[in-house]
Amino acid sequence: FKVVRVETKPFDGQKPGTSGLRKKVKVFTQPHYLQNFVQSTFNALGADKVRGATLVVSGDGRYFSKDAIQIIIKMSAANGVRRVWVGQTGLLSTPAVSCVVRERVAADGSKATGAFILTASHNPGGPHEDFGIKYNMENGGPAPESVTNKIYENTTTIKEYLTAEGLPDVDISTVAVSSFPGPEGQFDVDVFDSTSDYVKLMKSIFDFQSIQKLLSSPNFSFCFDALHGVAGVYAKRIFVEELGANEGSLLNCVPKEDFGGGHPDPNLTYAKELVAVMGLGKTNTGKEPPEFGAAADGDADRNMVVGKRFFVTPSDSVAIIAANAVESIPYFSGGLKGVARSMPTSAALDVVATHLNLKFFEVPTGWKFFGNLMDAGMCSVCGEESFGTGSDHIREKDGIWAVLAWLSILAYKNKDNLGGGKLVTVEDIVRQHWATYGRHYYTRYDYEGVDASGAKELMAHLVKLQSSLSEVNKIIKGIRSDVPNVVNADEFEYKDPVDGSISKNQGIRYMFEDGSRLVFRLSGTGSEGATIRVYIEQYEKDSSKTGRDSQDALAPLVEVALKLSKMQEFTGRSAPTVIT
Ligand code: VG1
Ligand code: CO
């Protein structure tokens, strides 16, 4: 092949958000749009990081991925990349990409220095839906803001990009290495099995034998819903082939370009089938629900864990995993280095950290902030309220890992109950946790696709209110007299303890006397308009009061949140799009 320079002009709005650049497919398929972003990334990394490098290129298989992979292969070749690693048929989950970057070694001993992940995660896919791309670094984690800011700057001035003329489309459907002679030597495209590196890593973390015993126990039953995302590939391999689960326990485990028309977001609203099977919804399947259920999002980094007729909030999930990790999961048997959560995530993890005397960190939303802590050996387990849980085995959140972590906890707690008799259930574990640590009632209201200027005004209004707490408290007393006083209000700002970098404006917080919190943020992953997220949390220490319905318990705070922010006035919405 030969290297050609293609003239181009900048596009507006190519700023990576919380997790890469996400836009409608029709935006991404404009001539040069994807190319501009990819070349801007190469330019931001610099020639010394790109020339001769090994790069991973794959994703969740959503619509446009296959074309995008061919485009990126050609541009990589032209920019002097030595080889590109592609998961078979272009499929690699986000956690598997992170794993491959960290663990996989080429025949000549080289490792990957980065990855393009093609996903818009939990956003729907298809010709009229979303596509996305993000770059991960040598540690397997998302590029830090210093890099994404540089990428964005480059997109605003780009004049040309490089591509390879005469390089044919590469067959990515079969495992094989294809080699092509280029002006500066050989260029390889190595298509490999999407699961093997990841499965090997999981086996080094968990005790597969004990999980297998649990799954085959007659009094245990299991169900996993991949929502037609890439998790299906891993679920089949791990849960069925390795751990012996029944094939029938897998729902929607065939990846589809449009996720079967659904919203591949594992929550009670979008994981409809799982919700019904687990006896959580209004529809009754007429069958006894399984003991354990889980779902993952499009790129398999998110997870939802549910028990029989029982939902586990993600904020509780990470706290429970942290509290039980050392005894249940071999990888952690030496103890936890520390734990971390994103700011809007409930303080359930904080309480565990205090009890177990663990280092604790509160970071802004988005996984990139956990990576620095992990690289510095300061954090083992971390999580977000948005159905993200993970550990320092990689530098992304990890849906399948979270399921295996829960199965490990269940296997450990039930090691003497398998084969018959009464099991310690998911619900038992959660209620026991609340009895020990107290309960953080928690809910999130999302207002999706609202008018961007209205959303901005709402946020500005909330910031302005913060200048007078006495005024805020007067307003609140007028809304609900049974809600305690706000004692602190600010915009969250984070100073990274490792590199000292500062991230400002990471969400508006109102903190109440009794530890309750209201948090308001604008989403950084949406592709159109604005999404307002309202996070509502209340701590209950009294173990006789930890069993309430969470929407009931939170009703007064919810009312305050919506009226204080003038939600309806600014957005015209009388109800949220999604409640989690
Ligand atoms: C959302 C979540 C955040 C998560 C991010 C990426 O971001 O709130 O916790 O890290 O999505 O997850 P935002 O800016 O829309 O609130 V994923 O699975 O979409 O990569
Ligand atoms: Co995701």
Image (cartoon, helix red, strand yellow):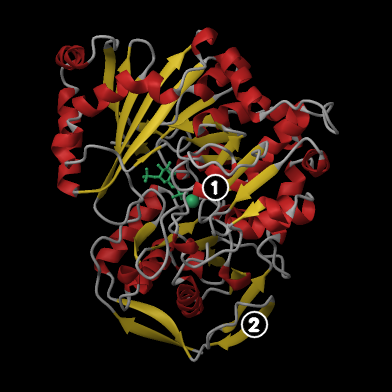
Q: Quadrant of residue 536?
A: top left
Query: In the shown orientation, is residue 144 left or right of residue 530?
Result: right
Query: What residue is rendered at 67% in x and 39% in y?
Result: 290
How many badges with numbers are in the image?
A: 2
Name the quadrant containing residue 567: top left
Which mark is drawn over residue 396? 1
Give the camera-side residue of 319 and 86.
319
- Residue 334 visible here: no
Residue positioned 52% across, 46% down in the render: 302
**Up-down: is 319 above or below 164?**
above
Mark 1: secondary structure:
loop
Q: Quadrant of residue 473?
A: top left
Residue 492 or residue 460, whichever sits in front: 460
Image coordinates for residue 408, horizontal then vertical, percent: 73, 36
- The disc, 2 or 1, on the residue closer to the chain's N-terminal end is 2
Residue 178, labelled with which disc?
Answer: 2
Residue 578 marker: none
Where residue 328 appears, as percent x and y from the top left, is 74, 30
| Amino acid at circle 1 | Glu
- How many residues crowd mark 2 within 10 Å: few (<14), some (14–19), many (20+)? some
Front residue of 408 and 221: 221
* Residue 205 appears anywhere in the view: yes
Could you say whether the residue bearing mark 2 is in a helix, strand or loop? strand
Residue at horizontal 30 percent and vertical 61 percent from the top: 14
